[in-house]
Amino acid sequence: MIELLGLAVALNHIEVVEVYAGKNLLQEEIFTDSAIETLSPSIFSSSNTNIAEQLERFSGLNKVGQGGLFQSYSIRGLGGWRIRTHIDGIPIITDRRAGNSASFLPPSLVQMYEVKKGASSMMHGSGAIGGVMNLTTKKPEHPTFSATRQAPNQGTSFSIGSGNISNSFLVSYRRADNQESASGVPLNTGYKQFAALLYQQGSFSGGLEYNLSWLPAVGKDIGKSSAKYPSSQIAIYPKDNHSLFQATLNSDSWFLKVFHHYQNWDSQVERIGSRENLTSYQSHTYGSNIYSSIHTQTASWRYGVDWLAREGIKISDRETPISSAPQNQVLIDGSTLNIAPFVDTAIQLDNVKVNIGARYDYFEAMNEARDRSDNHLSYQSSVEQKFKNHFLRVSYGSAFRFPAMTELYFNGVTPRGDTFGNQFLKPEKSRTVELNYIYSHPSFSGRLNVYKSTLDNFIERTKLENDDRTYINLNRVNIGGYEFALETKPTSQQSLKWNIAKQHAQQHNGNYVQGVAPLKMSVTYQFNLREIELSTEVTHRFKKHRVSSSEQPLPSSTLVNAYAKWQLTDTLSSTLRVSNALNSEFRTTADEDAPFVSQRQISLQLDWRN
C-alpha cells in the first residue's frame, strides 16, 4: 500500500523524491512524475528476505514464475524482460529466461523502492513496456547495526555500516536453510549471500558535484523452488556474483553518468535418474547517460543520449548424462549495442502541465557469425491538473522491447527443460492510455489508476509436443486493468490502508496470456502507542480459472502477516515479524511448476543506530 497521506503536502508543494524511475536526474520540480509510487522497506510486515515479496506491496505488482530467492515479479501482468529493473539507476540486464531480477541485492541494503507503471520506453528504452522499478540503496550517515534471526528455516542475517555526509559503507551477510510448506512439502529456498556498498560524494570548484559507488555481491547455493523439487528435479544457482560501479558528475544544468555491471553466475539442474546440466553465464554491461535541461518563459526542456553496451555475453553448458561422458557446448558468445537520443518538454499553464517527449533507439545484437539490427521511435504525452486536494493525469505513450539474446540464440537446458531460441523474433510494440486520479487530505487519501494497452508481436515461451520450449510472436495482446487504494487515519495513533487491483490480458484470438495475476485485495491496520508500533496485513487473492496453456487454475487464498516494533532506547529498537500467520498452504503463482508458499515464519530483528 502506498503512503498516500504524504501526498496531501505534495499536491501543493512537490518535494522531489523520485530520481531514476522518472529519469529526473537533476531533481527538478517541473519534471517530477506524480504517477510514480514509492515505498520504504521499513513498513513491510513480511520477513525481510525476498525482494519480490516486498514489491507485492505495490498494487498491480505480483510474483510470477517459480519460487526461491530469485523469484521474478511483474507489473500489471508484464514481467521478465518487459519491465526495467534498476539499482541506483543502473539497469540490471541478465540472461535468465525468467527475466531480470535484483534479488542479488539484500533488502537490508534498500532504502526506497520506486515504481513507474506503464509504458516508459520514452525515457528508459527497450524493455520498459510494463514499467520501471528502481531500488535506491542506503547511504548511512551514522554507525548502524542490524541482526535478524528467523525460524524454522534457521535464517540469519546481519548488516553493519557507517558514514557521514560525504562517505559511507554498508556490509550485509545472510543465509537460510530450505523451508517447508504448511503440510511439510519440502521447498528449495536455501541461500548464502554477501553484499557490500561503498559510496562517496563531493564537489569541485565551479559548482560541480560528483558521486562514486561500488556494490559487489556474492551468492552461493541459491535454491530455485519448484513443484518438481525434490522428486524429479533439483535446480540451484551454485554461484551468483555481481559487481556494480557508477560515477556521476553534474552541475545545475547537466548530468553525466557512466556505469558498469559485471555478472558471473551458474545454473545447475539435476534431473533425477537422467542427467545434470551446469550452465555458466557471464557478461559486462557498460553504459552512460548524458542529460541536460533548459528553461524558457514558455516551456522547460530536458534532453540527452543514452548509450548501453553488453560485451562478453558468454553462456556455456556442461551436460553430464548418468551413463556417459560429460559434453561441453558454447551456447552464446555475443554482444549488444543500444544508442538512444531523447527529448522531452514540460509546459506549465497555471495549474495544468503538459508533457510531450520522443526517443529514438538504435539496437544491434551479435552472436558469433549471426547479427541483427533494429530501431524504434517511442513517444509519450500527458496532461495533468492539480486543484485543491485533487490531482488528475491522462497519458498516452508507446513502448517496445527488442528480443533478448537468450530468446534469439539460446539453445540449451534450463530449470524448465530444453529451450531453443528463435532468431526470427520480431520486436514487441505497445500503445498505452492511462488515467491517474489522486485525492489527498490529512485524514483521508485515495488513488485510482485505470489503464489499457495493446501489445503487438508479444513474445511468449511456448511448450512443444515433446516438452521442449521455444519462443514465438503472438499477433496481438490486449491488456487492461485498474488499481484502487485508500488510506485513512481515524486517530493520530491509527491508520487503515486498503487496496485492490485487477488486471487481465488476452490474445486477439481469445486465448489467455501467462503471468497475469487474479484479482487481489489487501488491508493493513497500523497502531502506534508511544514506543510500540503494531501492524497487521491481510492479503486475499481471488481464484483464477482463466489460465494460459502453461498455467494451472488457482483457488482463492488468504495470507496474514504482522509485526510489532519496540523502541527500546534512543538508539536500539526491535521488530518481531510473523509471516503467513495462519500457516496457510497455496501455490505462489499460477505457473505450472509453482511451489507452495512457505510455512509460518517468525523472525526477530534488532536495530542499533548511534
Image (spheres, helix red, strand yellow):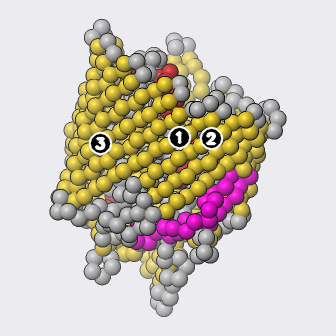
Identify the residue at horizontal 46%, vertical 58% (top origin): 541
Q: Nearer the viewer, mark 1 or mark 3?
A: 1
Distance, label 2 to label 3, CA atoms, is: 30 Å
Residue 424 in the image: above or below residue 537: below
Q: Residues within 10 Å of mark 3 (few under 14, many from 20)?
A: many
- Per the rendering, the mark at residue 526 is 2
Question: Is residue 239 something one can see in this rendering?
Answer: yes
Along the polypeptide, which appears first: circle 2 or circle 3?
3
Q: Amino acid at mark 1?
A: Lys
Identify the residue at horizontal 23%, vertical 55% (top origin): 477
Q: Residues within 10 Å of mark 2 (few under 14, many from 20)?
A: some
Q: Quadrant of residue 358?
A: top left
- Per the rendering, the mark at residue 451 is 3
Q: Residues within 10 Å of mark 1 (few under 14, many from 20)?
A: many
Q: Amino acid at mark 3?
A: Tyr
Distance, label 1 to label 2, CA atoms, is: 9 Å
Q: Secondary structure at mark 3?
A: strand
Identify the residue at horizontal 53%, vertical 21% (top origin): 209
- For mark 1, what is the residue? 497
Question: Is residue 278 something one can see in this rendering?
Answer: no
Distance, label 1 to label 3, CA atoms, is: 22 Å
Task: Tell me the magenta residue range.
Answer: 577-604
**Viewer-proximal residue among 291 and 334:** 291
Answer whether labels 1 and 2 touch (C-beta < 8 Å): yes
Q: Position of residue 113 (x, y in %)?
A: 51, 40
Q: Position of residue 562 (x, y in %)?
A: 64, 51
Most common secondary structure along the magenta stretch: loop
Q: Amino acid at mark 2?
A: Gln
Answer whether labels 1 and 3 touch (C-beta < 8 Å): no
